[in-house]
Image: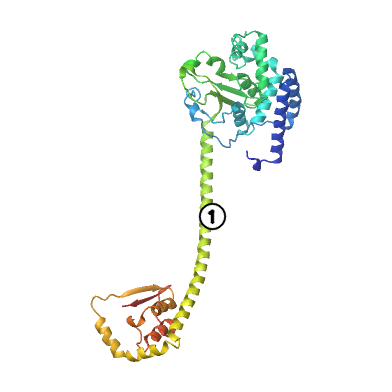
């Protein structure tokens, strides 16, 4: 959980268990007795932080590597879920099963450490590990040999078993330390419900599987819910004849994985729709601002062009030349010129413009005396005739939004 989304109570809970783990780590350096005393003090304060098994899973992903060795035939309704393999995989798995995320792994590590420190006599009693009444084998001495603290040459006598157990419990107080079967027993008692310890069925696990693939009962059952943890390896099978576990993965029902995927897809679609709406709104705002800016620029361009055209048409130095030219070009000559230039190959050109001023400026900036325009009254001065026509002295046919003018 991100710190920005945590409430004050969540931060207080997180701080308490972080401090508790530090105290347990310092006490463990002084021996198992000091470790037990520190665990007693923490146990008395755990009532202020009740543990409720969550039914909601926030974010889960399938552990595809573990699926290659998962015994799906024995547990068809379960699938292994991916958690970080940083040495805290079992506390992370416990956090996922209880809280629906991995962010409470420190709390689960503290709770398992206190459980192992305060209940050593219970867990070292073979009677408490019987599944059936006819079980007679020495379970504690057998699973002690699977511990990383059991060194070659050690005997499986009660003193050695107790020593290995204490080392396993003490190492729980440090982050990144690997957990084993005793920690699964502690997890079942912490949550107060049955726990399936699922072990892969491979050629190299035939002899060890009966002791580790089993149902673990809590010291006191307070919930009918059943949890499951899978012994796995981050490298997959990697040689079936010499396989050994190095990772734990929580197991959840398949329908939970499908529900989380559906919720994620729905949230993704909602997010995409919101982003699309924002993009459309932003584009519309940019278009409106651009249109208004273009209108201002166009207005200034028209004004400057009209000012330039007026200077060309009305300036005193060029007006006499225009008048002389208009006197020489009489109407009969224009008619003759149109008759001469009117050839069968001439095509009509249609202009689509937004205003009369635009078209007027277009003709005025060109050589207007060489362009013949339909429906214009031909006066002595064609420039004035064009300008008067497009400035409103004569009505033109307009479309719904723009005017259309046709020239030859």
Q: Badge 1: few (under 14), some or many (20 or more) residues near its Cα, within 10 Å?
A: few
Q: Is residue 386 left or right of residue 302?
A: left
Seen in the picture, residue 390 relative to 137 is either above or below; the reply is below
**Residue that lies at the very extreme toward the left in this rendered image:** 344
Q: Residue at x 68, y 26 (%)?
A: 111
How many numbered discs sit on the rendered protein? 1
Tell me, yes or no, if residue 352 can be seen here.
yes
Q: Considering the image in quadrants, where does the C terminus appear? A: bottom left
Is residue 222 in view from this perspective?
no
Applied colour scheme: rainbow
Q: Position of residue 331 (x, y in %)?
A: 31, 90
Camera-side residue of 71 and 86: 86
Rendered view: 316 above or below 229: below
- The image quadrant that residue 334 belongs to is bottom left
Q: Where is residue 323 in the image (x, y as percent from the top left)?
A: 38, 90
Quadrant assignment, res 341? bottom left
Above or below residue 326? Residue 361 is: above
Residue 376 in percent (x, y) is at 35, 84
Q: In this view, does 359 lie above or below 22?
A: below
Q: Which residue is drawn at 49% across and 28% down?
A: 65
**Image quadrant where one finds the N terminus:** top right
Residue ID for mark 1: 278
Classify residue 209 as left or right of residue 396.
Answer: right
Say which of 322 and 244 sits in front: 322
SS at mark 1 in the image: helix
Residue situated in front as seen by the camera: 44 or 218 = 44
Name the residue at the front extreme: 317
**Residue 30 placement (x, y as % from top left):** 74, 20
Is 269 or 246 nearer to us in this picture? Answer: 246
């Amino acid at each position: 959980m991100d710190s920005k989304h945590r409430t004050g109570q969540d931060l207080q809970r997180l701080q308490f268990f972080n401090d508790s783990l530090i105290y347990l780590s310092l006490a463990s350096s002084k021996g198992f007795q000091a470790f037990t005393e520190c665990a007693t003090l923490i146990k008395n304060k755990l009532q202020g932080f009740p543990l409720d098994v969550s039914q909601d899973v926030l974010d889960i992903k399938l552990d595809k590597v573990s699926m290659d060795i998962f015994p799906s035939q024995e547990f068809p309704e379960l699938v292994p879920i991916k958690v970080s393999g940083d040495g805290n995989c079992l506390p992370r798995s416990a956090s996922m099963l209880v809280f629906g995320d991995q962010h409470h792994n420190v709390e689960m590590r503290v709770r398992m450490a206190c459980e192992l420190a305060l209940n050593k006599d219970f867990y070292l009693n073979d009677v408490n590990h019987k599944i059936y009444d006819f079980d007679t084998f020495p379970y504690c001495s057998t699973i002690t040999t699977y511990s990383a603290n059991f060194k070659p040459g050690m005997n499986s006598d009660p003193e050695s078993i107790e020593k290995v157990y204490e080392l396993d419990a003490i190492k729980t107080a440090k982050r990144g330390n690997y957990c084993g079967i005793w920690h699964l027993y502690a997890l079942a008692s912490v949550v107060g419900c049955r726990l399936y310890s699922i072990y892969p069925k491979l050629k190299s696990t035939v002899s060890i599987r009966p002791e580790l693939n089993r149902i673990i009962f809590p010291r006191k059952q307070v919930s009918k819910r059943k949890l499951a943890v899978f012994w796995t390896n981050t490298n997959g099978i990697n040689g079936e004849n010499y396989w050994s576990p190095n990772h734990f993965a929580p197991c959840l029902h398949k329908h939970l994985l499908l529900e989380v995927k559906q919720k994620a897809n729905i949230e993704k679609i909602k997010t995409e729709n919101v982003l699309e709406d924002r993009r459309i709104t932003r584009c519309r705002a940019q278009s409106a601002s651009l249109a208004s800016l273009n209108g201002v620029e166009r207005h200034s361009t028209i004004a400057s062009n009209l000012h330039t055209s007026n200077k060309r048409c009305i300036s005193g130095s060029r007006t006499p030349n225009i008048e002389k030219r208009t006197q020489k070009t009489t109407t009969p000559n224009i008619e003759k010129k149109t008759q001469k230039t009117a050839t069968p190959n001439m095509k009509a050109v249609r202009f689509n413009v937004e205003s009369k001023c635009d078209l007027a400026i277009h003709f005025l900036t060109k050589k207007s005396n060489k362009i013949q325009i339909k429906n214009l009254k031909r006066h002595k001065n064609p420039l004035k005739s064009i300008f008067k026509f497009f400035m409103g002295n004569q009505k033109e046919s307009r479309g719904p939004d723009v005017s259309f003018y046709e020239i030859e």
